[in-house]
Amino acid sequence: MRFIVCVKQVPESNDLKIDPNANRVLKKGVSTIINFFDQFVLEEASKIRKEGDEIIAISMGDSETKSTLMRCLALGADKAILLNDEKFLESDTFGTSNILAAALKKIGDYDIIFCGNSSLDTGSGQVGPEIAERLDLPQVTYTESIENVEIGKIKIKVQTDEGYSIIESELPLVIAGIPPSYYQPSIPPLPKIIAAQKKPFEVWNAEDIKGDKSKFGSAGSLIKIIKLYKPPKREQGIVITDEPKAAIEKLMELLNKDKVI
Amino acid sequence: MIEFTEEQKLIKQSVSEFAQRKIAPIALEMEKNKEIPQDVIKGMAELGLLACTADPAYGGSGLNAVTAGVIAEELAKGDCTGSTCVFYLVQAAWGFLLNKYGTEEAKKEIFPKATAGDWFLGIATTESGGGTDVVGGKTNIKKDGDFFIVNGEKMYISGVREAATNGGGHITIAHQTPELGSRGMTVFYLPLTAEGITPTYIEDLGREGISCGGFSIDNVKIPKHYILGEENKGFYIIHEGYEYARALIAVICAAAGLKSLENGMNYAKERKVFGQPLAKFQEINFRLAEHYTKLEMLKRLGYEALRAIDLEQEGKGNRFETSKIVAMAKMFASDWACEAINDALQWQGAFGYSRECPDQAAWRAVRSFSLAEGTREVMKMIVARELLGKELISYK
């Protein structure tokens, strides 16, 4: 089977900077990491892979994005593809999903397309579902784990407001994953980082992926950001460290005082 | 500044994640318990950090010196006590020497266990009568058929308990042909579990997660495959290990100092005095600028020193040029880092002087490095020797 994992490079959350003139998150000169949700789905893909299966990591971005894809190779992907072209610049989720869908069509023969449920920077959660729409595939969002997968069929555990559900689907499909609370991202060990340098790494531009170029980049984007800004810094809350009984009394007192209850 | 490769950037990120997630939260606890927890040692082994300079054929990662420096930097940022830094750097530097000069048999025996975190591979050259003056040591080694017999003692050695208890040993040096002085010394691996080794322990000022001590060596018999390089050429061989360790120490000191500056800076930005943030006072922001500049210079010089080692291994460098740049990098490493950390403690007021403050542990750890692996004074002698020429060497 062939699994494709769509990944995004995002700024480290404690290092988020905004260009107020361009209304966008700055990526140059800030430390970046793989989107937390994307590493989770890559690890899920690695868990279900069997001998002969292939995992391809794909990302749209500039040359700096290479480090995120190299991390994917060190975490178990067999091949990485960087989608890099000036025509891709200023893409919103609509443009991004068009570009990714065109690249996925070029790869072809996929069984599962994995995406993180959302990204740590913009957090819209739209790219995965949009890819599914463009490729006319079933989609399952809020995936916590894959219970079972066999040729043409998959059983998935998804998070719901009430708990979780088990969903069955035919393949191929798009999965948007969200980790359980106990998830700790794996740290790639040195031997795998070293081995990753020898794995196939391709860079594709707009010509390579074909598709409708009018739907790429700013030309193909629908969202116009009026203003992008950081929320004001919140003051630290009150921490009650008393014994339970005294803590409850203090909490009730505070809630009453603020007329919350 | 050296531009890191993609591989080095990924290694840096991995080690940073490991150090911040697994070491930083328990660093002060390591000092209280006087040991590095097994899960941290095993974690370092699984990541491929231990004796990482050994060839992959023996279980190592085959890293070069600059990459070894990248790891040292991230460990120093995560471990305020410096304990895992010492545990790491000793095995990286002296693993390099064993990898280069050790016999096939010794490498196959020692590296798989050291890289797995089961054994500790240390360095033991200091004696109670002298450290950096290696020739002044009294330990001797004599050939006995296919074996060698060692007698003497070593003192102020890191990782004695780790090697004596869990297994492993130390690279050491002794006089084989005493009348030849520096030209009659031999380097070898000495297992601390051997019969005739009696360890003793010393309470160190800092980096208390790793033991410090000494051991007497009473008629210890070692096989000839434990000899590193040629007999009687040890004085020259040992300096390659020293230099590797010294360059790593420069990077560790810079990283530890910069981490404390960051802690002090964050505190000074938040803490208000006389109605304004502490950081607004010129006394603090000038000192911050000076320390930061010195430590960035130190870090860059440290990496240049590591690169000089790599170039020499690739046949593109010069032995004496490497010695000089390494000595330059280590000369003020401890002093500059200590000065910066001392100020960071001052900015943090009474908290800075408490045992809860990570920076006090960093100060105690970094203080050791003006002594360890060659004193500050000897670094000056090396640089002066290379500038003035051998005829004006101060120690001859």
Image (cartoon, coloured by chain):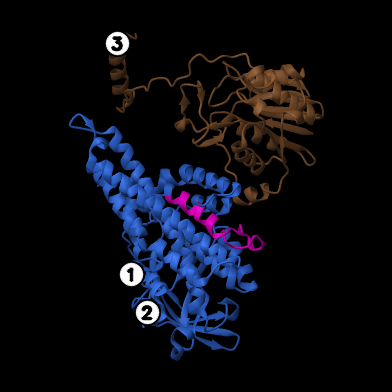
Residue linked to disc 2 = B393
Task: Give how far across and how far down residue A177 sits, in percent.
Answer: 63, 26
Q: CA distance from mark 2 to mark 1?
A: 13 Å
Instruction: Specify the chain shown as blue.
Output: B
Residue linked to disc 1 = B377
Q: Is residue B308 magenta?
A: no
How many neighbours does mark 3 have within 10 angstroms: few (below 14), some (14-19), or many (20 or more)? few
Q: CA distance from mark 1 to mark 3?
A: 68 Å
Q: Secondary structure at mark 1?
A: helix
Please give the chain letter of the residue carrying mark 2: B
Quarter holding the C terminus of chain B is bottom left
Q: Looking at the image, can residue B82 be seen?
A: no
**Tint of chain A:** brown
Q: Earlier in the sequence, mark 2 or mark 1?
A: 1
**Looking at the image, which residue sits at the far bottom?**
B179
| Amino acid type, residue under disc 3 in the picture | Asn
How many neighbours does mark 1 have within 10 angstroms: few (below 14), some (14-19), or many (20 or more)? some
| Amino acid type, residue under disc 2 in the picture | Ile
Q: Looking at the image, can residue A160 be seen?
A: yes
Q: Secondary structure at mark 3?
A: helix
Residue linked to disc 3 = A256
Q: Is residue B66 magenta?
A: yes
Between tags 3 and 2, which lies in front? 2
Main SS category, magenta section: helix
Whether label 2 touches label 1, CB < 8 Å = no
| Amino acid type, residue under disc 1 in the picture | Glu
Task: Give how far across and how far down residue A192 sits, in percent.
Answer: 64, 48
Highlighted magenta segment, given as a residue range: B52-76
Q: CA distance from mark 3 to mark 2?
A: 80 Å
B116 vs B396: above or below:
above
Q: Residue at x 32, y 63 (%)?
A: B203
Q: Secondary structure at mark 2?
A: loop
